Image (tube, helix red, strand yellow):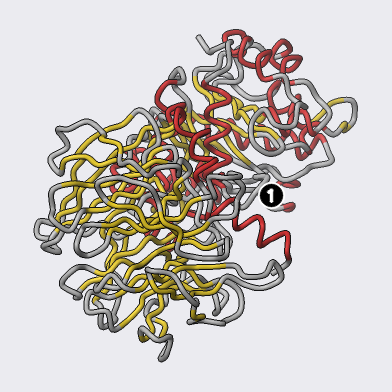
Amino acid sequence: MKTGRIICNIVASLTTVSAMAQQSSEVISYLEIYDLETRTHSVLKEFPFRVEAPHWTPDGKYLVVNKDGKLYKISVDGTSDLIEIDTGALTCVDINYVITADGKWIGLSSNSPSNQKHDSFIYMVPFEGGEPRRVTPQGLSYIYGISPDGKTVVYCAYRQLDEEADIYAIPVEGGDEIQLTDATRFDSGPEYSPDGKHIWFNSVRTDAMQIWKMDADGGNQTQMTFDEDMYSWYPHVSPDGKKVVYTAYRRHEVAPDEHLPNLNVQLRMIPAEGGEPEVLVELFGGHGTLSVNSWSPDSRKFAYFSYRLAEEITSPMKEMGVQLYSARKLIGTPELFAKNHKYVLSRLSQMGYTSAEAISYEDGRFSGLSPEHFRKTLNDAGLDLMSSHVTHTLSDAQLDSGDFSEEMEWWDRCIKAHVKAGIPHLVMSYGQPMSSICHFKTMAEYLNAIGRKCTAARIRFGYHNHNHEFAPVDGTTMLDYLISNTDPDHVFFQMDVYWTVDGGASPVEYIERYPGRFRLIHIKDKHEVGKSGMIDFHEVFSNFEKAGTEAFIVEMEYPSSSNVLKGLRESALYIRNMKQTTK
């Protein structure tokens, strides 16, 4: 790890407090309780700002939370207001803090009150409030655990900028620190087991952040989780010592040593002796959700925070679809769909998407599901099933001969499946490049034949353009020919505004040239919608009525980062906040 990366981790991951103040008005926080006996979770209290890191007090009376660098307590029934805990001169408390087993002290990390730089030290403060006492002589120290006897602090520390984060221990009263781990890269999150014999922590030493356990003196360091598709953070051991709950990030959304806010995460649990993880909760959260031990004293419940981005709630709602191809890295195969669809589809609904366009039809099924089951899956997530993309092109021989009769049996089966799914629009998603009017003619006849079958089945049939349809051929283009030679009663066109511009044409000029032919429109940019500046989306939207557009679908072809859901959220909010809207 280079020096710059270490500083980035320190600022972005470990000293979140300064950023937290900036985000507090942008997030709705939900303090939730998970009940292990009933396997249910419920919202205890809602806050119109960011609150993080709930910690159950040992006497069971309060939950302590962090807001804007200060600690507060709230009654466990959620009826009280936030009651500030006096931390003296410390006003920039990190979200990693620990209440001692006797409930008398809080160990916390904070920037030095003398300079407020990112030089975090560890302090002890009376739970009832008072002036802090500094424990660690050196900065860049972040507390995570205190031994059950209250005598030792364990923490993550950077001791030189060209070294890695390791785990250290130091007497609560101060003294010499002892280095417990020296693995390459990043060790963090140390927490004692209730009997004080072990320390649980997370480490990226295997190139994937996972949960580990070691003896209290640093010996016998043992990997405890092996989550193949997740990065695992912050193990918290139940007071009875039997269970460990932790936060798991999906690998496609973060780097191995990142634990960021505002992402889709899971809360998982394993037996303390090790074993297969159980997924307890899927939620929108991350850093701040479960950063400290939040088990109830009886080990039956634990507290955590889930979040909603306030802009997702307050921005104007629009009826808008999303092309599921945009999330193909997450749900693009039946296997990925089965594993990820629940959180992906529900997250898309939260962003403001109201419907979806499928890409997954094959042999009578959608993403491996029956048509009826596929539709129900989307509906359960809050999405209507607006349309479906399918591709079934003609061979060169068929284009030459004009005989495509054999292909119509395939379309009969395809249309039947779409009727079962209740999909109102069926769109041919691709037609291969063609360089002769003869081929154009066959293709137009092919589209008309499919369209008539769809009309008979009470489905609307359309054709989706890419950029090659705008290449000149014998005084026309493929798209001009297809529009001019297909029956408007049976064939509509789904304009993709990005591919239109990329093909050298103007979406609005085509709307003016062929009014009423573009029943559906793909709103797409080179990356996230509105980011490139190459498309005037306001002008496109204002011409929907002339285009005959009844609905639009957002697609993200090339996301600018690996976090696909972040890009889809940015696209949704850009459109929701546009001044010009569809009619």
- In this image, 24 relative to 450: left or right? left
- Identify the residue under disc 1: 398
Give the amino acid type for the residue marked by disc 1 in the picture.
Answer: Gln
| In this view, 14 is above or below 256 | above
Q: Is residue 526 left or right of 33 when viewed as pictured?
A: right
Q: Is residue 337 above or below residue 272?
A: above
The quadrant of the rendering that contains the N terminus is: bottom right
x then y, percent, for residue 567: 58, 40
Above or below: residue 195 compared with residue 3: below
Which residue does the image show at 26% across and 34% down from the upper left? 82
Q: Quadrant of residue 312?
A: top left
Could you say where residue 135 lies in the image, as x and y percent from the top left? Answer: 45, 64
Looking at this view, is 246 or 101 the one in front?
Answer: 101
Please indicate whether residue 142 sits to the left or right of residue 558 in the image: left
Q: Residues within 10 Å of mark 1 (few under 14, many from 20)?
A: some
- Residue extending furthest right? 474
